[in-house]
Amino acid sequence: MTAYDADPRSPQWRVGWLAGASVVGVAAGLLVTLILLARRIAGQAGEISSGLQRTARATDGLWDVRRLNATLERILTAVSPGEPPATSAAGEGELTS
């Protein structure tokens, strides 16, 4: 008797169907898990992106600090031409009162 002639109710067929169903079940479970994780990651990426955009908008003014310091130094020099601009103890060129 060949495999093609075997009775579909035989134990070999049942083991085959069980093994096949198990493989399909595991593959389906992994696929669902992968899809759920991908959606979660996409959601987190969106939150991170919007947070970075808010941070960029909130810190835009910091890029103008160097220009502001240079302008204030020129103003101070123009007001008191005989004295050099006051510097901080660290010597970073910050204005002191």
Image: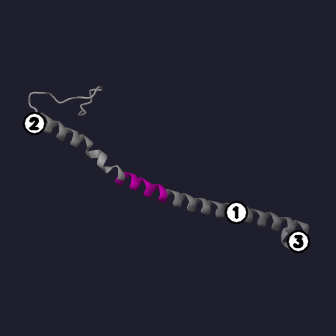
Residue 43 at x, y = what percent? 52, 61
Indicate whether 9 appears above or below 52.
below
> Is 19 in front, or is 49?
49
Q: What residue did someone put label 3 on?
A: 6
Frontmost of labels 1 and 3 is 1
Q: Secondary structure at mark 3?
A: loop
Indicate whether 60 appears above or below 35.
above
| Residue under the point 89% across and 73% down | 9
Q: What residue did someone put label 1 on?
A: 29
Give the residues drawn in magenta, as a range: 46-57
Q: Secondary structure at mark 1?
A: helix
> Is 13 in front, or is 52?
52
Frontmost of labels 2 and 1 is 2
Q: What residue did someone put label 2 on?
A: 78
Task: State which quarter of the image contains the C terminus.
Answer: top left
Q: CA distance from mark 1 to mark 3?
A: 32 Å
